[in-house]
Image: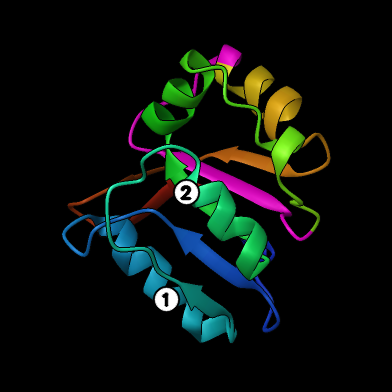
Amino acid sequence: HQLHSNIKPEDRVFYFTSCGWMMWNWLVSSLASGATLMLYDGCPEGEILWQYAEAEKITHFGTSAKYIDNLQKTVCRPKDSYDLTALRMILSTGSPLTPEGFDYVYEAIKADLCLASISGGADIVSCFALG
């Protein structure tokens, strides 16, 4: 976490996941870096996750490539509506993030952050490739 995602004790780490997905284990292990976990229980309808990111000053936002693709299709532009100053990193997994997804994140969410399309596996409950 510290090497690949630059997670520090003052960080607020969010990953939209259920406890049945291996990303739950990744998220919970952020506690070893002293970070605060940010949890959300429910269906992420509309722009609720961006409202949450702004209100709670989330520094690391994790989600699926499909979620980013859906945002792009609905022409959602979080940077126009939310203060995402605290956000330093977006992590995407579940499937590879398309080149258009990268362009979308930097154009519509935030230009000055690290966007990492990470890859892992349930069989090892870990990641093969990180930021």
- Quarter of the picture holding the N terminus: bottom right
Tell me if 131 is positioned left or right of 48 in this view: right
| Residue at screen point 29% across, 63% down | 41
Of the two numbered discs 1 and 2 on the same chain, state the one appearing first in sequence. 1
| Residue at screen point 54% across, 46% down | 91
Q: Amino acid at mark 2?
A: Ile
Give the camera-side residue of 61 and 95. 61
Classed neighbour count for the residue bearing mark 2: other residues with Cα under 10 Å, few (<14), some (14–19), many (≥20): few
Tell me if 130 is positioned left or right of 70 in this view: right
Return the residue at label 2. 48
Q: Amino acid at mark 1?
A: Ser
Tell me if 81 is positioned left or right of 70 in this view: right
Return the residue at label 1. 29
Where does residue 60 sit, x and y in percent of width and height?
A: 61, 58
**Region rendered in magenta:** 86-100
Marks counted in the figure total 2
- Does residue 93 belong to the magenta stretch? yes
Give the camera-side residue of 28 and 85. 85
Where does residue 107 sit, x and y in percent of width and height?
A: 75, 23
Classify residue 15 by image quadrant. Answer: bottom left
Q: CA distance from mark 1 to mark 2?
A: 25 Å
Classed neighbour count for the residue bearing mark 1: other residues with Cα under 10 Å, few (<14), some (14–19), many (≥20): some
Disc nearest the viewer among 1 and 2: 2
Give the colour scheme of this rendering: rainbow
Q: Is residue 48 above or below residue 86?
A: above
